[in-house]
Image: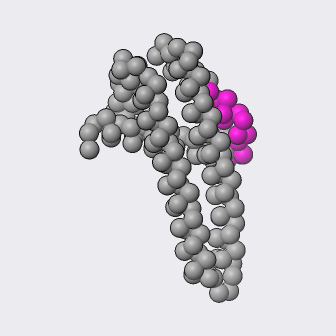
Amino acid sequence: MTTKNKLLIAGSAVLAFVILTGFRGGHFGGPRDPERVKQMITWKMDDRLEDLKATDAQKQALHGLKDSLFEDGKRLFEEQKDSRGRMLEQWESPNPDARAVHSLVDERVDAFRAFAHKVADAALEAHRILTPEQRQQVTAGVREHMNAH
């Protein structure tokens, strides 16, 4: 696997993590408003796009990718809440249905896999949208972030 592929996968995983965990809770565990989270992601993205000196067309295309992923992530999060409730019902049952539990696990794995593929596709599209110089800047930022953690 090439370094570029590893970076794309790492970037995809980071993006998926940020999108999904953005809904976990606000300060002190309180619920977070998804639209507020989306606005915060947009502000951070706008800052990065300014640093990259992205064109208006690039900004529009990349924001489209972000908005699509955000909506998919929001839907995935809502489905996850429902799944936790269904799993809890099985746990509370005197005779949990093993087939239902395993089916639920498979359903969630498939949903997360599908989302991860969408994130990977979005990363590949972002790669096509950015110039080689902009991609170098992004790579440097990712490497710096990875080395800091």
Q: Residue at x 68, y 86 (%)?
A: 94
36 and 113: which is toward the camera = 113
29 and 73: which is toward the camera = 73
Q: Which residues are magenta?
A: 28-42
Q: Residue at x 73, y 40 (%)?
A: 33
121 and 6: which is toward the camera = 121
Q: Residue at x 56, y 57 (%)?
A: 111
The colouring scheme, among rainbow, by chain, secondary structure or one colour, is: one colour
Magenta stretch contains residue 102: no
Main structural element of the magenta stretch: helix, strand or loop? Answer: helix
Q: Quadrant of the C terminus?
A: top left
Q: Where in the figure is residue 136, as x and y percent of width and height?
A: 35, 22
Reply above or below: 3 against 91: above
Residue 51 shows in the view: no
Reply above or below: 85 against 124: below
Q: Where in the figure is residue 124, as x and y percent of width and height?
A: 43, 35
Q: In the rendered view, does 118 fall on the left or right side of 73?
A: left
Residue 130 shows in the view: yes
Going by the picture, which residue comes out furthest to the left? 2
Residue 87 falls in image quadrant = bottom right
Q: In the rendered view, does 11 fall on the left or right side of 88?
A: left
Residue 39 falls in image quadrant = top right
Magenta stretch contains residue 31: yes
Going by the picture, which residue comes out furthest to the bottom? 95
Residue 93 falls in image quadrant = bottom right
Q: Where in the figure is residue 130, as x and y percent of width and height?
A: 44, 22
